Amino acid sequence: MRVGIGHDTHRLEPGRPLLLGGVRVEHSRGLAGHSDADVVLHALTDALLGAAGLGDIGDAYPDTDPRWQGADSRRFVTETLARLNRDGWRVVNVDVIVFAQEPKLGPVKAAIRRSLAELLGLPADAVNVKAKTGEKVGHIGRAEAIACQVVALIGQTI
């Protein structure tokens, strides 16, 4: 068994859709980034890469590479899963914390959980999604950004 941790932060800006864990969330602003800026999927990718000792998302999918411009972040996860599978690893479970002052994420946590479980090929009880506010402190608390932290456990497929 191996554990990896991932983190990502993107600022909110008008004119972009808000995607979290592959789920479109209704909000007046979305996350800025080179790809679709889905902080949940970026942190998940980082956690999986880290658990397998494969570097980080910036190494695997650099924002300097035009292939990733506007990319659907589910692709980062599916390509990373393929790498893990080739190396004999499977995902056991993931624990996700989304940090957002707004929008309120309680109504979409279950949808994010289902989306991640489907993407990872896991039962829903192997995926946990929590939401925390910034308590009006810092860039999260001022609703300038959304961040995510993910812990992933992987095991050998032998």
Image: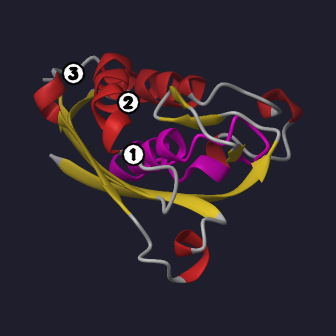
Residue 19 found in image quarter: top right
Boundaries of the magenta span: 31-58
Q: Residue at x 62, y 62 (%)?
A: 145
| Label at residue 82 | none
Instruction: Identify residue type, mark 1.
Output: Leu
Specify which label sits upstream in the sequence, 3 or 2.
2
Q: Is residue 135 left or right of residue 113?
A: right
Residue 93 in picture, x, y percent from top left:
19, 38
Distance CA(mark 3)–CA(mark 1): 22 Å
Q: Residue at x 48, y 22 (%)?
A: 78
- Is-magenta flag for residue 44? yes
* 141 up-or-down from 59: above or below: below
* 136 up-or-down from 103: above or below: below
Closer mark to the observer between disc 3 and disc 2: 3
Instruction: Identify residue type, mark 2.
Output: Leu
| Label at residue 84 | 2
Residue 54 in picture, x, y percent from top left:
47, 47
Residue 79 in picture, x, y percent from top left:
53, 24
Q: Residues within 10 Å of mark 1 (few under 14, many from 20)?
A: some
Determine whether the residue tagged by mark 1 lies in a helix, strand or loop.
Answer: loop
Which of 60/39 is in front?
A: 39
Closer mark to the observer between disc 2 and disc 1: 1
Q: Residue at x 51, y 59 (%)?
A: 147
| Label at residue 122 | 3
Determine contact: label 2, label 1, CB under 8 Å: no
Residue reaching furthest to the bottom: 137
Residue position for label 1: 105
Q: Residues within 10 Å of mark 2 (few under 14, many from 20)?
A: many
Specify which label sits upstream in the sequence, 2 or 1.
2
